[in-house]
């Protein structure tokens, strides 16, 4: 599904140039659950952003589903992204002014799904995440665990092929964190590819494979049994 | 998608109430001001553009060289109308217009009303429709009269007045031959009735064949297809070919230019009211722009709050286009709300605005065109104010926003700062202009008129006043109402007559020099408290030869260059006049111009006005009561009407006063809107820097220190605005002052006051938020992170 080759990304300020990704190569197959680990500043977030097409690489190749996307413009990336990728963030990133239902509905609006179909699909996914009873609440009225479930609901409502999760349990206590990891595992078992950035060895154990980064390069890969 | 936008817009508006109120208030005030100005501009631009024949309608003008300069004026000789109709096949219709002022009597009801004499063509040349009567024939019979609806109601109680009789000036009976729809609010004409030219001729000694007396306005409708240029060529020599007057060119001034382009310099149109129209249109655009800038500033200032939403929307699939659409939609919605508020403001403030501008503007609620314009206006405002925030907000990179590394730019030349500078530049220009307009007004009002205006009253000599003048004069004096009385050709505040027919020893026979003319009988200097510099006043009682005596003013003396003016001869054509006195220059016409040369003739001339100095020992009310009794006794048919010279004199400043009031009004509004924006910005600044303030306070910063730090940045912007505004204001006001000969010099303190006022207002605006932020408990603000 994903194949990146010699990917490079630099950050420049006036004085210094920082290398975030240094000729990084890797691949992820359809249906995999991959965890990316590494210390702060190792480039894992940058990698995730490029994989999610929120950012573009300076050098190298990124083939997504057989399409070279490294030098796509913003509109093409956005188009590819909204049909194929769902995001889950550490800080949930829900829109405060929208209700649970409306937050989850948002991706469907941007992909042009009809209103009746939207209701059906949002209700379906809210049901699955067990937050149907909170559908008319606003994010600030929910607990952290509930908010992250809404965020996951939003990430999957469009039935994406790939879910990118950036420390999804980082803001949660361990019980809520385990719930979230169970949800992700379920999704993976139903066929969704998942790439997750995490600091937590515990969470990483839910994955099939761990890629460890240091200074923008892969230093180790562990295959989980 | 649209519903989703609407929802989030609405929730955002409710959630940020202060932001919403500031935005809507600012935009509404801006829109309302712009709308009021545009109403006014529309009214000005539509003057006399409703006549069906407007494209063929012209006023005849004269052009001639006087004192080395080419002058153009719209008064023509009375016989021109007939000559045009007879000898110029290009002319389809023609009519003269001359003001009239008559006393109307119905039973025991007496009313003096302004009207006009005109020719029969008038009613079919101009589109002033008749409700009753036939416009083709209504002015054919000498004693027929056409009334406006208003006048008909005043006289008869209803508009169904056709065929009824009115008594005019206690001498003649007229039959109403037409009732006209009231004149609209956008015409140059102001008559309340029309009378026939034939009646004027009957009462003024027959057909006037004098081509040397320019006293009527002559209008023509040209045949279809005749161009202005062609007709001008044909008509140029009409006066020369018909009379002995050989130095006058005639031309036609088209209806499309009457209102806005009627200022001539050296015989050519150089503009006119269009200058004011343009000026106020610019002000309207700027006020609206300033209001839009507020919106832009507040929206972008809140960008850190909105950034997260933008990021999330982008991540879940929103393209830049749909985000631009969303933010545009938001601003259009705010503009719509502001538009509704603005409409209410306009509705409430239109009556006082009408009083101020002396107009009768109204909101055309029933007109679809009006609503179309309203919608366009709202969309325009919404799109204008939403454009920058939409582009700015939609360009956020989601990676940065969602990772929390996003910080709104704080560059030296950030667009937001430039916008604030623009706002304040405009506000300061208006403040400086207002002060200078007021100063100029003050300066002119305090100018020495040359005589004493207070307690000086006058009455027009109507009915039997002139016949009984001596009796009235004596009784005004003996009853104690007045301390001095004189009759004159015109009120002291108006120049009704001028002439270039004078010659004297030493005058260059080849130049025309135009003199203001004024006629008085005895006691002129005593009544007016006018200083005689040399010689004496005209006094027919003691000097029987004074029927050919004249007074000249200082300006005339300077021009005539007499060493010993008393006893010198001045010829008026063949008539020999003798100078008996020189009076101090007094202002007859414009208080902004130097006093013009003037010749004051003695008692053999014509008179229209009786001036009387009220007795200073009595109250004004007592004097007027006594005077009324005298006038009633000798002129019983007419109501007693009087004017005060000082009041009439003050009317000379009406235009400048209006400009001054409007300038202060719009300066006030501009500064209000600008400060509103500044307040909003300060609020967000205080919120954004709350953590910084907390840290600084923990480290020992004082409240004053923090307040100063927060206020300083804004004051810098106001300072820059002041530097930009000063040359602009100076240049434009210097330009404006050039139109007055008698004018103030722009002094430095004007700028100092403007700087002080603006600084003070911005300090008050900003420091409110700054102090609040500085006083906040740092523990709270730091914990909230």
Image (cartoon, rainbow, N blue to C red):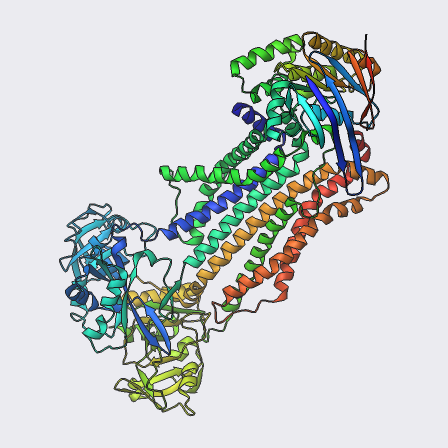
Foreground residue, A131 or A113? A113
In front: A185, or B706?
A185
Residue B31 lies left or right of residue B751; in this view the side is left
The spot of residue B497 in percent (x, y) is 32, 73
Q: Residue B780's image quarter?
A: top right
Above or below, comparing residue B438 to residue A54 in the picture: below
Q: Give the quadrant of residue B61.
A: bottom left
Residue situated in front as seen by the camera: B659 or A108: A108
- Residue B4 seen anywhere in this rendered image of the structure: yes
A158 in relation to B156, above or below: above
Which residue appears at 27% of the width and 84% of the height? B573
Seen in the image, is B274 located left or right of residue B213? right
Residue at 73 percent of width and 28 percent of height: B403
- Which quadrant: the N terminus of chain A? top right
Q: Quadrant of residue B460?
A: bottom left
B348 vs B428, left or right, is left
In the rendered image, residue A117, in percent from the top left (x then y), is placed at 54, 13
Can residue B464 be seen?
A: no
Question: Residue A27, percent across and down?
Answer: 73, 18
Where is residue A191? Give x, y as percent.
67, 9
Q: Is residue A145 above or below residue B332?
A: above
On the rendered image, what quadrant is the C terminus of chain A found in? Answer: top right
**Residue under the point 20% across and 76% down:** B243
Q: Nearer the viewer, residue B309 or B15?
A: B309
Considering every residue shown, the one lying at the far right of the view is B699
């Amino acid at each position: 599904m994903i194949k990146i080759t010699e990917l490079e990304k630099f950050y420049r300020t006036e004085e210094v140039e920082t290398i975030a990704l240094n000729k990084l190569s890797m691949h992820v197959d359809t249906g995999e659950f991959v965890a990316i680990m590494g210390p702060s500043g190792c480039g894992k977030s940058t990698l995730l952003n490029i994989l999610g097409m929120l950012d573009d690489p300076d050098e190298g190749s990124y083939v997504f589903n057989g399409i070279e996307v490294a030098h796509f413009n913003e509109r093409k990336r956005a188009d590819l992204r909204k049909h194929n990728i769902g995001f889950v963030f550490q800080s949930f990133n829900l829109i405060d002014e929208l209700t649970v239902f409306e937050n989850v509905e948002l991706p469907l609006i941007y992909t042009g799904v009809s209103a009746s179909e939207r209701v059906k699909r949002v209700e379906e996914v809210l049901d699955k995440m067990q937050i149907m009873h909170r559908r008319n609440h606003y994010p600030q009225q929910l607990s952290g665990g509930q908010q992250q479930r809404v965020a996951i609901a939003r990430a999957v409502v469009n039935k994406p092929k790939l879910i990118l999760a950036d420390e999804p349990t980082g803001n949660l206590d361990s019980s809520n964190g385990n719930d979230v990891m169970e949800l992700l595992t379920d999704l993976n078992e139903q066929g969704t590819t998942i790439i997750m950035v995490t600091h937590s060895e515990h969470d990483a154990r839910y994955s099939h494979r761990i890629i460890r980064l240091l200074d923008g390069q892969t230093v180790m890969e562990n295959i989980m049994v | 998608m649209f519903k989703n936008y609407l929802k989030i817009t609405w929730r955002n508006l409710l959630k940020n109430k202060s932001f919403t109120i500031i935005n809507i208030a600012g935009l509404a005030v801006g829109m309302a001001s712009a709308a009021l100005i545009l109403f006014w501009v529309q009214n000005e631009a539509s003057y006399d553009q409703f006549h069906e024949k407007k494209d063929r309608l012209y006023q005849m003008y004269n052009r001639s060289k006087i004192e080395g300069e080419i002058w153009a004026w719209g008064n023509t000789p009375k016989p021109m109308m007939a000559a045009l109709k007879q000898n110029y096949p290009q002319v389809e219709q023609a009519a003269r217009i001359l003001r009239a002022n008559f006393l109307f009597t119905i039973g025991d009801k007496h009313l003096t009303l302004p009207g006009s004499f005109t020719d029969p063509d008038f009613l079919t040349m101009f589109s002033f429709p008749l409700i009753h009567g036939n416009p083709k024939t209504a002015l054919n019979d000498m004693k027929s009269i056409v009334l406006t609806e208003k006048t008909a109601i005043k006289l008869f109680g209803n508009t169904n007045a056709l065929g009824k009789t009115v008594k005019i000036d206690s001498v003649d009976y007229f039959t109403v031959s037409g009732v006209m729809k009231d004149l609209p609010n956008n015409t140059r004409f102001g008559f309340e009735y029309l009378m026939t030219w034939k009646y004027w001729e009957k009462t003024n000694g027959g057909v006037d064949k004098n081509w040397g007396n320019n006293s009527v306005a002559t209008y023509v409708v040209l045949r279809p297809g005749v161009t202005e240029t062609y007709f001008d060529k044909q008509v140029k020599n009409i006066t020369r070919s018909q009379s002995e007057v050989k130095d006058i060119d005639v031309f036609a001034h088209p209806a499309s230019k009457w209102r806005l382009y009627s200022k001539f310099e050296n015989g050519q149109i150089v503009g006119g009211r269009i200058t004011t129209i343009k000026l106020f249109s610019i002000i309207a655009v700027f006020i609206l722009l300033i209001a839009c800038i507020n919106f832009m500033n507040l929206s972008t200032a809140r960008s850190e709050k909105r950034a997260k939403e933008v990021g999330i929307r982008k991540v879940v699939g929103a393209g830049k286009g749909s985000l631009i659409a969303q933010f545009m939609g938001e601003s259009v919605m705010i503009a719509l709300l502001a538009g509704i508020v603005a409409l209410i403001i306009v509705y409430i403030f239109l009556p006082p605005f009408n009083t101020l501008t002396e107009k009768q503007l109204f909101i055309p609620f029933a007109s679809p065109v009006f609503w179309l314009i309203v919608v366009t206006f709202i969309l325009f405002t919404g799109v204008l104010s939403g454009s920058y925030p939409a582009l700015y907000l939609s360009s956020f990179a989601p990676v940065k926003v969602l990772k929390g590394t996003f910080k709104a730019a704080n560059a030296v030349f950030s667009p937001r700062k430039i916008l604030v500078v623009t706002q304040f530049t405009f506000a300061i220009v208006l403040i400086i202009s207002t002060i200078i307009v007021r100063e100029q007004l003050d300066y002119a009002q305090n100018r020495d008129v040359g005589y004493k205006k207070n307690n000086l009253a006058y009455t027009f000599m109507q009915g039997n006043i002139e016949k009984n003048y001596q009796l009235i004069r004596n009784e005004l004096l003996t009853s104690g109402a007045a301390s001095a009385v004189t009759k004159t050709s015109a009120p002291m505040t108006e120049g009704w007559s001028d002439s270039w027919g004078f010659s004297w020893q030493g005058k260059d026979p080849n130049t025309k020099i135009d003199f203001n003319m004024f006629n008085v009988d005895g006691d002129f200097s005593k009544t007016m408290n006018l200083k005689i510099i040399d010689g004496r006043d005209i006094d027919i009682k003691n000097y029987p030869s004074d029927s050919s005596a004249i007074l000249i003013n200082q300006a005339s003396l300077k021009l005539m260059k007499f060493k010993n003016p008393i006893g010198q001869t001045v010829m008026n054509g063949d008539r020999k006049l003798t100078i008996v006195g020189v009076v101090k220059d007094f202002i007859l016409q414009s208080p902004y111009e130097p006093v013009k040369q003037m010749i004051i003739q003695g008692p053999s001339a014509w008179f229209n006005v009786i001036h009387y100095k009220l007795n200073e020992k009595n109250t004004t009310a007592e004097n007027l009561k006594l005077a009324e009794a005298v006038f009633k006794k000798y002129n019983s048919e007419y109501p007693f009407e009087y004017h005060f010279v000082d009041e009439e004199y003050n009317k000379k400043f009406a235009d400048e006063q209006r400009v001054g009031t409007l300038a202060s009004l719009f300066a006030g509004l501009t500064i209000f809107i600008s400060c509103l924006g500044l307040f909003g910005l300060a609020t967000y600044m205080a919120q954004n820097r709350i953590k910084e303030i907390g840290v600084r306070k923990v480290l020992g910063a004082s409240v004053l220190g923090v307040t100063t730090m927060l206020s300083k940045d804004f004051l810098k912007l106001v300072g820059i605005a002041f530097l930009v505004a000063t040359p602009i204001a100076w240049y434009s006001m210097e330009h404006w002052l050039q139109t007055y000969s008698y004018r103030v010099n722009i002094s430095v303190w004007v700028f100092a006051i403007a700087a002080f006022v603006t600084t003070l207002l911005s300090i008050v605006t900003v420091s409110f938020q700054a102090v609040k932020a500085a006083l906040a408990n740092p523990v709270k603000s730091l914990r909230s992170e």
